[in-house]
Amino acid sequence: MPIRIVVAGLLPALAAVALICSRSVVGEPWPWLLVNLGLALIPLALAAPMRPGGRSWLAVPWLAFFPNAPYLVSDLVHYADRPPVPTWLDAAMLGSTAAAGLMAGAISAVWVARCLAPRLGSAGTAVASGIVCVLCGRAIELGRVQRHNSWDLVLDPLPVLWDLTRSVAAPLEHAETWAITAAYALVVAGFAGAVALLMDRQ
């Protein structure tokens, strides 16, 4: 991945870090948000060394960690009035981390798609990208609502598989699950599509 694209993915994260650190000066620190932001940058780090037609095996760990990036959007649920921290500071902090996650995730997704395109073809890449958006939305629901994380795929996969199986086997009984999945999939698809258009012009 060209260095300028990597830098573009990191700049919003740097702004978010500055705001998170600023919050610790005026109120209770939120180190967990820094951890979430760090996890959100893993997909970008995994995508960076990929090249079109080569190193496609990196797409596997990338897919496992990719939902951590747009997951930051769901951290907006933590927004509340928490004196002495000004509400405008928390709004800027949470908004910037969400934007940083979307930017890093979208850049990594577009780059991975480009690297896989020689193997999958244009139609296959489009279908795979759509599937990834849905999987990402489902993973965010699993993380935010069911409280699973990426490490559970390796360390404790059975509860994750159980929650997935239940929602697939009885989708009408898990309507909210699929509504959340669709909402986040739409956000990811829209942001990745916009980034793809911008990168295609370069």
Image (cartoon, rainbow, N blue to C red):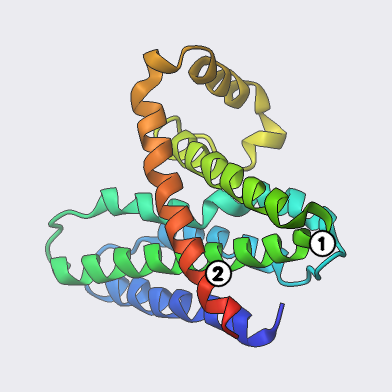
**Disc 2: CA contacts within 10 A as few (<14), some (14-19) or many (>=20):** some
Outermost residue on the front side: it is 123
Distance Cα–Cα, label 2 vs label 1: 17 Å
Count of number-bearing discs: 2
Residue 190's x, y, as percent? 43, 58
Q: Which residue is mark 1?
A: 118
Residue at the location (55% across, 23% down)?
A: 164
> Taking 24 as reference, is 2 left or right?
right
Q: Quadrant of residue 111?
A: bottom right
Outermost residue on the right side: it is 54
The foreground one among 158 and 118 is: 118
Is residue 123 depicted above or below 180 in this figure?
A: below
Residue 12's x, y, as percent? 44, 77
Q: Is residue 188 visible?
A: yes
Residue at the location (38% across, 62% down)?
A: 98
Residue at the location (28% across, 76% down)?
A: 25
Q: Is residue 101 visible?
A: no
Q: Quadrant of residue 180?
A: top left
> Taking 70 as reference, is 76 left or right?
left
> Taking 169 as reference, is 51 left or right?
right
**Kind of residue sitting beneath label 1:** Pro
Q: Which residue is mark 2?
A: 196
Residue 81's x, y, as percent? 12, 57
Residue at the location (41% across, 59% down)?
A: 33
Which mark is first along the chain, 1 or 2? 1
**Disc 1: CA contacts within 10 A as few (<14), some (14-19) or many (>=20):** some
Is residue 14 depicted above or below 137 in this figure?
A: below
Is residue 190 depicted above or below 132 in this figure?
A: below
The foreground one among 18 and 49 is: 49
Quarter of the rendering occupied by the N terminus: bottom right
**Kind of residue sitting beneath label 2:** Ala
The foreground one among 123 and 70 is: 123
